[in-house]
Every structure is written in structure tokens, then in C-alpha cells.
């Protein structure tokens, strides 16, 4: 939300800790959801590596599945 945005001059006053924080809120048709996460830089890199590995493994799996259908 707009009130959660930290102005640049205030953000620079906070010490750098290597931790990243994000907050999100959604309201729609009587439904409300809030989420907050805090993660380190190493955690972000680990998640990126896992997502990359998953995406790279999808193509061979799909190709193998298509190849097995042709033999039926």
C-alpha cells in the first residue's frame, strides 16, 4: 500500500543488514489477504537457483513424454 512505502531519504538511514523484506495486501470482493516475508541475499540466490533448475528440467520431461506417446 502507499503508506507502506519508505521514502528514499529515510531508507538510507537504516543500516544495511543483508536482509530483504516485502509486504503485500490484497482486498477483493470481501476477501482480504496479507503476506509478509523476510529473506537474506543468500536465500534469494538459492531460490533463484532452484527455480532455474526446475525450469531447465521441464523441457526434457515434456520431450520424453511426447516421445513415449508416439510409440503407442
Image (cartoon, rainbow, N blue to C red):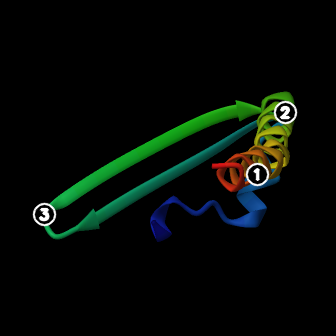
Crowd around label 2: few <14 · some 14–19 · many ≥20 (10 Å): few
Q: Is residue 12 above or below residue 37?
A: below
Image depth: mark 1 or mark 2 in front: 1
Q: Is residue 1 left or right of residue 56?
A: left
Q: Residue tagged by mark 1?
A: 67
Q: Is residue 17 above or below residue 54?
A: above
1 and 59: which is toward the camera: 59
Please name the residue shown 48% across and 70% down the image.
Answer: 2
Q: Secondary structure at mark 1?
A: helix
In front: 16, or 69? 69
Which residue is situated farthest in the front direction here?
72
| Camera-nearest residue between 18 and 68 | 68
Report x, y in % for residue 41. 84, 34
Q: How far separated are the C-alphas under marks 2 and 3? A: 37 Å
Question: Marks 3 and 2: in contact by CB < 8 Å?
Answer: no
Q: Nearer the viewer, mark 1 or mark 3?
A: 1
Residue 18 is tagged as 2
Residues under labels 1 and 2: Cα distance? 46 Å
Mark 1 and mark 3 residues within 8 Å of each other at the beta carbon: no
- Residue 16 in the figure: left or right of residue 67: right
- Indicate the secondary structure of the residue bearing disc 2: loop
Front position among marks 2 and 3: 3
Q: Which numbered marker is on residue 30?
A: 3
First reached walking from the N terminus: tag 2 or tag 3: 2
Residue 40 image position (x, y, % from top left): 78, 30
Q: Is residue 5 visible?
A: yes
> Which residue of the protein is positioned furthest toward the left in this rendering?
30
Q: How many marks?
A: 3
Q: Secondary structure at mark 3?
A: loop
Distance in Å between CA atoms under marks 1 and 3 = 47 Å
Q: Residue at x 76, y 41 (%)?
A: 54
Q: Disc 1 or 2, which lies upstream in sequence?
A: 2
Amino acid at each position: 500500500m502507499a503508506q507502506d512505502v519508505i521514502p528514499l531519504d529515510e531508507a538510507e538511514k537504516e543500516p544495511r543488514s543483508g536482509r530483504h523484506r516485502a509486504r503485500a495486501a490484497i482486498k477483493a470482493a470481501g476477501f482480504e489477504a496479507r503476506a509478509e516475508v523476510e529473506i537474506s541475499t543468500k536465500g534469494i540466490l538459492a531460490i533463484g537457483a532452484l527455480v532455474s533448475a526446475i525450469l531447465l528440467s521441464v523441457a526434457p520431461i515434456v520431450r520424453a513424454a511426447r516421445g513415449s506417446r508416439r510409440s503407442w
